[in-house]
């Protein structure tokens, strides 16, 4: 397992690296947010929020925007971090300084286990842009970690667009896939569903209108 350790304080990072490597992890250490954003995230990111150059929360969000890699946030300011804020940032868990090494390793293993579980149970979970997450077994959708209640048609529409993110789907293709072959009603229905889906996903930018053709799921953040 490869970890990316983002920590500006050498007095913390050096013993941490030694300990983690003894536990069998391969650790890449960077000291700034900018370096973190340029580094390979590996299998898990351990991210100190108090960095010299960028706000750790911004770094967390930017990593999350482009990757589903598990992120454990390290914070010295326990009182300022609530779970909702962490979810919004895209973190999977957090530890508060000063933390025990054993506690940290237990958290790392737990987060990796959860991530691995999702990966192997697998294909049913689809991620898009690190923001939208669709569990196809349960038809459960979250946006930035928040559950979204979709109607069955809205769900099917999102699921269909996600099948080939970035590709333009014509109105006919969508109507055939999401409604059915015998659909003969107004294709306004499609626009109405797209509008409500956009609203529930928290903005229009995810589902793009391709004028005169159809729709597509925006490819990337
Ligand atoms: Ca720090």
Image (cartoon, rainbow, N blue to C red):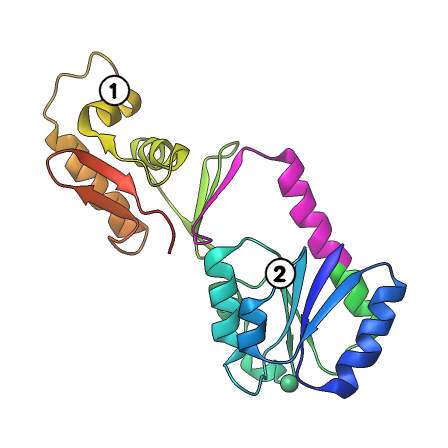
Q: Position of residue 184 (x, y in %)?
A: 13, 16
Q: Secondary structure at mark 1?
A: helix
Between 107 and 34, the one nearer to me in the picture: 34
Q: Which mark is residue 41?
A: 2
Q: Quadrant of residue 52?
A: bottom right
Residue in the image at 21% along x and 29% along y = 170
Q: Secondary structure at mark 2?
A: loop
Label 2 packing within 10 angstroms: few (<14), some (14-19), many (20+): many
Q: Which numbered marker is on residue 176?
A: 1
Question: From the viewer's perspective, is 170 left or right of 127?
Answer: left
The magenta-colored residue range is 109-131
Residue 113 falls within the magenta-colored stretch:
yes
Residue 149 locus on image (x, y percent): 37, 44
Relative to 127, does residue 159 appear above or below in the rendering? above
Residue 129 among magenta residues: yes
Occupied quadrant, residue 15:
bottom right
Query: Which residue is at a point 24% across and 23% down the rendered structure image?
Result: 173
The residues bearing labels 1 and 2 have C-alpha atoms spaced at a distance of 40 Å
């Amino acid at each position: 397992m490869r970890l990316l350790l983002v920590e500006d304080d050498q007095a913390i990072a050096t013993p941490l690296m030694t300990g983690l490597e003894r536990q069998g992890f391969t650790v890449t250490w960077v000291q700034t947010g900018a370096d973190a954003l340029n580094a390979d995230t590996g299998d898990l990111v351990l991210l100190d929020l108090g960095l010299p150059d960028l706000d750790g929360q911004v770094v967390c969000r930017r990593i999350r925007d482009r990757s589903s890699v598990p992120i454990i946030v390290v914070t010295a300011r326990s009182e300022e971090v609530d779970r909702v804020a962490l979810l919004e940032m895209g973190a999977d868990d957090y530890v508060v300084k000063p933390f025990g090494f054993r506690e940290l390793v237990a958290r790392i293993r737990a987060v990796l286990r959860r991530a691995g579980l999702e990966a192997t149970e697998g294909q049913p979970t689809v991620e898009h842009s690190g923001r939208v997450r669709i569990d196809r077994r349960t038809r459960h959708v979250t946006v930035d970690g928040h559950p979204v209640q979709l109607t069955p048609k809205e769900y099917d529409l999102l699921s269909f667009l996600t099948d080939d993110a970035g590709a333009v789907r014509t109105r006919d293709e969508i109507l055939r896939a999401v409604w059915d072959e015998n659909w003969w009603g107004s294709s306004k229905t499609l626009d109405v569903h797209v509008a409500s889906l956009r609203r529930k996903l928290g903005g229009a930018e995810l589902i793009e209108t391709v004028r005169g053709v159809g729709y597509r799921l925006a490819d990337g953040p």
